[in-house]
Image (cartoon, helix red, strand yellow):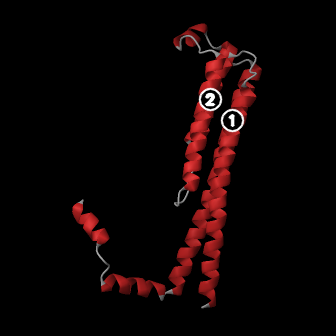
Amino acid sequence: MLGHMIGQIKPKTASTSNEVAEQATRPGQCQEQIMGTINRLHALSRRGLWGILLFASLSAVTLYCHQAGLFALLPIDGKALFGDLPPSNLLHVVLAVSWLSAFVLILGRVSGDGEPTYNWCNVGLPTVFYPLYIFSDAGATHFPAVFAAGLVLLLIEHASVMLYVSKALREEKERLTHLQLH
């Protein structure tokens, strides 16, 4: 480990500098690298839409099953397996705390210098609350709250990634234009 750290601290040798200079003189390779980065950024921007679609699909299936009465068909023994359900007020508090913690994590990734990523837990976390609310609230009056919490969280995460992607795409396209002019 110490050898690796020393290798990172040492100044680069002339051969490494020559390799960098040689790569810079190959405009075709630089163009390919920039185009690869642009394609990767476009793929990153679409990944959040897949998460939103997955969450909306899971929400629609949950709502349909509840409206069709499929959850009422579960045997009472199966419900007893989970034990007593927590009161709705406690579920509200846990949903709010989990949403707030996920929101803080998203803000932490936004403020970082690196490339933001999507966290698939933000899709699963609100989805976990559906069964809890369905079994504790027969009227499904809390479905909109869970859906709104999950959707807002995913939209904020997607917006933060899209801001980064648009900035990075603009920079990469400027590099590509500058490279084509020279």
Identify the residue shown where x is 72% and y is 15%: 138
**Helix, strand or loop for disc 2:** helix
- Nearest the viewer among 99 and 80 is 99
Q: Residue furthest bottom?
A: 182
- In the rendered image, which quarter is residue 74 located in? top right
Residue 153: where, in percent of width, then height? 66, 42
**Would you place residue 56 above or below residue 48 in this image?**
above
Q: Which mark is residue 95?
A: 2
Residue 126: where, in percent of width, then height? 62, 33
Residue 38: where, in percent of width, then height? 60, 69
Identify the residue shown where x is 28% and y is 74%: 10
**Would you place residue 30 above or below residue 73 in this image?**
below
Q: CA distance from mark 2 to mark 1?
A: 8 Å
Query: Which residue was labeled with disc 1?
Result: 149
Amino acid on which the number 1 mark rests in the picture: Ala
Q: Which mark is residue 123?
A: none
Q: Earlier in the sequence, mark 2 or mark 1?
A: 2
Residue 1: where, in percent of width, then height? 24, 59
Q: Sort mark 1 into few (<14), some (14-19) or many (20+) by Cα contacts within 10 Å.
A: some
Amino acid on which the number 2 mark rests in the picture: Leu
Identify the residue shown where x is 64% and y is 82%: 177
Mark 2 and mark 1 residues within 8 Å of each other at the beta carbon? yes
**Helix, strand or loop for disc 1:** helix
Q: Sort mark 2 into few (<14), some (14-19) or many (20+) by Cα contacts within 10 Å.
A: many
- In the rendered image, which quarter is residue 86 located in? top right
Q: Quadrant of the C terminus?
A: bottom right
Q: Is residue 130 left or right of residue 34?
A: right
